[in-house]
Amino acid sequence: MVETSLPAADYAAVSEIRARRPELVAEALGARRRRELLGQDGRLMLVAADHPARGANGVGNRPMAMASRVELLDRLQTALAVPGVDGLLGSADIIEDLAFLGALDDKVVIGSMNRGGLQGASFELDDRFTGYDARSIAESHLDGGKFLTRIALDDDGTLPTLTASADAISELAERRLMAMIEPFWSSRGRDGRVSHDLSPEGVIKSINVAQALGRTTAYTWLKIPVVDDMERVMESTTLPTLLLGGDPTTSPEETFATWSKALALPAVRGLVVGRTLLYPPDDDVAGAVRTAVSLVR
């Protein structure tokens, strides 16, 4: 029989714990050593891994790159071990696996809240909160919650998503937990596919709607893409902001240069990056993460 003590020695032990002692999920999360959200430098470097929960497994020209959970966990443990990485943004399944493995001690951990808008679905823009809620984030001893909020004037799913996002901001604030909102000005094309307006004007409009949600913005952070004219984009908010990496469309050198320029702007506090760092073209996860850390710090 595989040992069921914590931390788990390997993935077989994680599966054994899940099967025989599910109550250890709460124990692993409760025993995690926590830290302040921001260090002395006021910067934040997070690795994101909530894409598969929305059916988004692709990276570049690899449509199922993130399909192997074992490989993803390997890459996440490598990334989290790089000095200067502050923590993780993930869905409950990934967070709990890494907590079992002892990989989240002294890390900031942000729970992904809405994954109901499955990629390519007819209901994609009605992005239900199928993951964490504010109560479970607090009970799991996490540091905040993140939610995707796509604003599409041509889709009725936008209104319930906006309402749920506003409620999440208010409920997290009541518990003094970060509410990280990731807004996009979106639309559905003739082919039914959802696209985002990544012009400066589109991002500014999404920020203006997102930052007004909730009964208070005291604990609200933004997570936005890097686009053209970021100086003007960042003039649209005073909220602390993290830059998202997204699915890479340029070379790593071009991507890193774009991030470096945007990170120098006021209110920009750091990066939340997933696929770009976890699945770089050369598969050198540690090298890609070290480069990103050097830009943030």
Image (tube, helix red, strand yellow):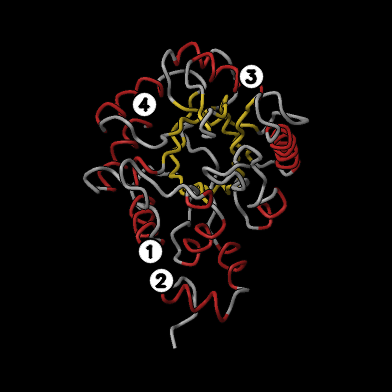
The residue where tag 4 is placed is 259
Bin the neighbour count of mark 4 within 10 Å (Cα to Cα): few under 14, some 14-19, many 20 and up.
many
Vertical arrangement, residue 198 with respect to residue 221, above or below: above
Q: Secondary structure at mark 3?
A: helix
Instruction: Tell me the distance, in whole angstroms, between the alpha carbons under discs 1 and 4.
Output: 29 Å
Discs 3, 1 touching: Cβ within 8 Å: no
Instruction: Tell me the distance, in whole angstroms, between the alpha carbons under discs 3 and 4.
Output: 22 Å
| First in sequence: mark 3 vs mark 4 | 3
- Quadrant where the image shows the C terminus: top left
| First in sequence: mark 2 vs mark 1 | 2
Vertical arrangement, residue 243 with respect to residue 64, above or below: above
Q: Secondary structure at mark 2?
A: helix
Q: Residue most toward the front?
A: 190
Instruction: Tell me the distance, in whole angstroms, between the alpha carbons under discs 3 and 2.
Output: 44 Å
Hey, what amino acid is under mark 2? Tyr
Residue 208 is tagged as 3
Please identify, in this view, whether the residue under mark 3 or under mark 4 is nearer the observer. Answer: 3
| First in sequence: mark 3 vs mark 2 | 2
| First in sequence: mark 3 vs mark 1 | 1
The residue where tag 1 is placed is 70
Hey, what amino acid is under mark 3? Asn
The residue where tag 2 is placed is 11
Vertical arrangement, residue 290 with respect to residue 222, above or below: below
Which one is in front, 44 or 222? 222
